Image (cartoon, rainbow, N blue to C red):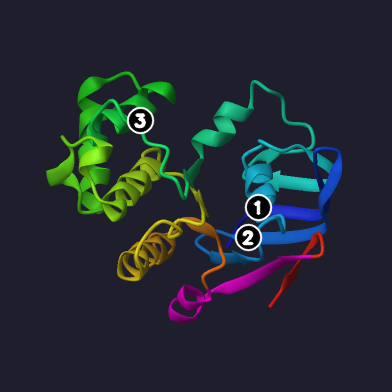
């Protein structure tokens, strides 16, 4: 299998302080990976570095075909088209429907053909069981339904990588289990999924490789 992420001796800084150091990480195509650790341990910093929101301070880092140590500002939007991001707090646009939220993303990432856009939105909404709620605005949806819309949004451009930052943090346990089960299903179809969490119950229920963030570095369990 091909590696989609390859970090060697990487160091990351936040506010001029070392967030992570000596990071060695290789993620294969279709792999599911948990990133665990306390709040402030560097989980989000690592995820943000993968989509070039935090620069690489030292070391070597490649994501897909992009060298993160030399990536230009003009290249970053193209990198991000290949990465789906799932946030804990959803970050949906509240003034428009679920369908319109997804169409907005397609327009922002260069789609032009309205018929193709409509078909793609319908396909991803159907895949997460939300096609019948496409007309609803975020406030009309439950937390679990909103998170399913967020997953649909992350899948729009068929990204080879999905990053999920505490995706069950605002959900009840049963809904959270459903969401994680679906993310595992996505990885089995060939998409690499990296999920930051501190919910060890879910890690035990849905086993996968686990990396721990602690003491400014990352180690295997």
Q: Residue at x 21, y 34 (%)?
A: 119
At mark 3, the secondary structure is loop
Quarter of the image that includes the C terminus: bottom right
Instruction: Give the residue pinned by disc 3.
Output: 93
Q: Is residue 58 visible?
A: no
Q: Which residue is mark 2?
A: 27
What's the mark number on residue 5?
Answer: 1
In the depicted view, which residue is nearer to us: 180 or 73?
180
The answer to whether marks 1 and 3 mark residues whose Cβ atoms lie closer than 8 Å is no
**In front here: 53 or 123?**
53
Identity of the residue drawn at 62% across and 29% down: 76
Residue 170 percent location from the top left of the image: 41, 56
Badges 1 and 2: C-beta atoms under 8 Å apart? yes
Label 1 to label 2, Cα distance in Å? 5 Å
- Tell me what residue is drawn at x 86 percent, y 44 percent: 17
| Mark 2 or mark 3, earlier in chain | 2
As drawn, is 30 to the left or to the right of 6?
A: left
Q: Mark 1 vs mark 2: which is more N-terminal?
A: 1
Mark 1 Cα within 10 Å, few/some/many (few <14, many 20+)? some
Residue range highlighted in magenta:
200-214
Percent across and percent down for residue 77 are 56, 27
Q: Is residue 137 magenta?
A: no
Compared with 193, 100 (above or below) is above
Q: Is residue 126 left or right of residue 35?
A: left
């Amino acid at each position: 299998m091909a590696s989609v992420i390859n970090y060697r001796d990487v160091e990351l800084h936040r506010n001029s302080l070392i967030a992570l150091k000596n990071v060695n990480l290789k993620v294969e195509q279709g792999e599911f990976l948990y990133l665990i650790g306390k709040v402030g341990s560097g989980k989000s910093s690592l995820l943000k570095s993968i989509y070039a929101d935090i620069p690489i301070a030292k070391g070597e880092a490649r994501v897909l075909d992009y060298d993160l140590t030399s990536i230009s500002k003009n290249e970053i939007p193209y990198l991000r088209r290949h990465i789906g991001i799932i946030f804990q707090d959803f970050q949906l646009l509240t003034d428009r429907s679920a369908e319109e939220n997804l169409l907005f993303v397609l327009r922002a990432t260069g789609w032009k053909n309205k018929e193709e856009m409509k078909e793609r939105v319908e396909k991803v909404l159907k895949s997460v069981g939300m096609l019948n709620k496409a007309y609803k605005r975020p406030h009309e949806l439950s937390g679990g339904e909103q998170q399913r819309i967020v997953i649909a949004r992350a899948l729009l451009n068929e990204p080879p990588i999905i990053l999920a930052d505490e995706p069950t943090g605002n959900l009840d346990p049963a809904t959270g289990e459903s969401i994680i089960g679906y993310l595992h299903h996505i990885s089995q179809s060939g998409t690499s999924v990296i999920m930051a969490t501190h919910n060890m119950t879910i890690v035990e229920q849905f086993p996968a490789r686990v990396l721990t963030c602690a003491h400014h570095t990352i180690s295997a369990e």
